[in-house]
Amino acid sequence: MTDHATTPDPSAQQKIDTSVPHSARIWNYWLGGKDNYPVDEAAGDAYSAVFPGIVTVARSSRAFLRRNITHLITEAGIRQFLDIGTGLPTVDNTHEVAQRLAPQAKIVYVDHDPMVLTHARALLTSTPEGATAYVDADLSDPDRILAAAAETLDLSRPTALILSNILGHIADYDRARAIVTRLMDGLPSGSYLSVNDGSRGTDAGYEQAQDTYNESGAVPYFLRPVDQIAAFFDGLELLDPGGVSVPFWRPEPGSPAAEPIGEHGGLARKP
């Protein structure tokens, strides 16, 4: 959780339903954050009772993103990031990782969630040399996202598009593919796509827990076969080691031996 003070947006606060568990708040709870309600903690605990490994999935996803950003800054020279499906501020948000390494980095966060909006100011801190911005928009409207992002980012220059645990909220796979394609079409050669999402075929316990959650009436999140996640990178140059279970994506030296989990992702360059 960041230490930045936030001022909730009153209009957004009125839209928050605290009687129903919400995926962003539950994810925040699993990551050790405090921006959640008792209903989210109860749902998170019920989920982890069925599948205790969910905390590992959440934290491995965040570590994967951190390693992606580190590569993009230090090896690829990227200084612009478009992070869609921001979620609630926790530890090592995109701008924190990027600007620690390159203070001039610019980040645009995109989300369409009242709870995230109330805490957007925590995501708007920036180094003097760089910039951050928050766009209230839905993933299903890529043209609006690109237009709004262009107010902060120079989209004629290489930009990293980050889609972390957001595409699973798009039930129709073809539609999800089309959204990714449209977003990447709006970015120039030399840009990158970072995707990681929950996957099927690795952990039956995870699949059972997620299917039960989806049937609870909460906002559903659909686990996808690994080959479908890999196909989001079609037409791009997928970096080694390819689309893999996220602990296997360039683990840091000295880290414990990786174990496969139901979370797959990769990083690819637009030629």
Image: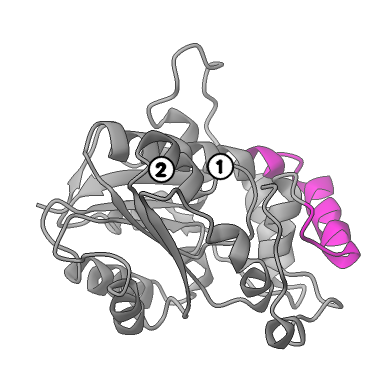
The residues colored magenta run 34-56
Please state the horizontal and vertical placement of residue 213, each as a whole percent of the image. Answer: 73, 65
Name the amino acid type tagged 2: Ala
Residue located at (55% from left, 65% from top): 222
Name the amino acid type tagged 1: Asp
Residue 209 in view, yes or no: no
- Left or right of 34 in this view: 127: left
| Location of residue 86 with respect to 60 vertically, above or below | below
Between residue 76 and residue 269, name the one nearer to us. Answer: 76
Task: Tell me the residue that label 1 is attached to.
Answer: 92
Residue located at (43% from left, 29% from top): 248
| Location of residue 240 with respect to 226 vertically, above or below | above
Packing grade of label 2 (10 A; few <14, some 14-19, many >=20) is many
Between residue 68 and residue 89, name the one nearer to us. Answer: 89
Packing grade of label 1 (10 A; few <14, some 14-19, many >=20) is some
Residues marked 2 and 1 touching at CB (< 8 Å): no
Please state the horizontal and vertical placement of residue 27, each as a whole percent of the image. Answer: 68, 55
**How is the structure coloured here?**
one colour
Task: Tell me the residue that label 2 is attached to.
Answer: 98
Mark 1: secondary structure: loop
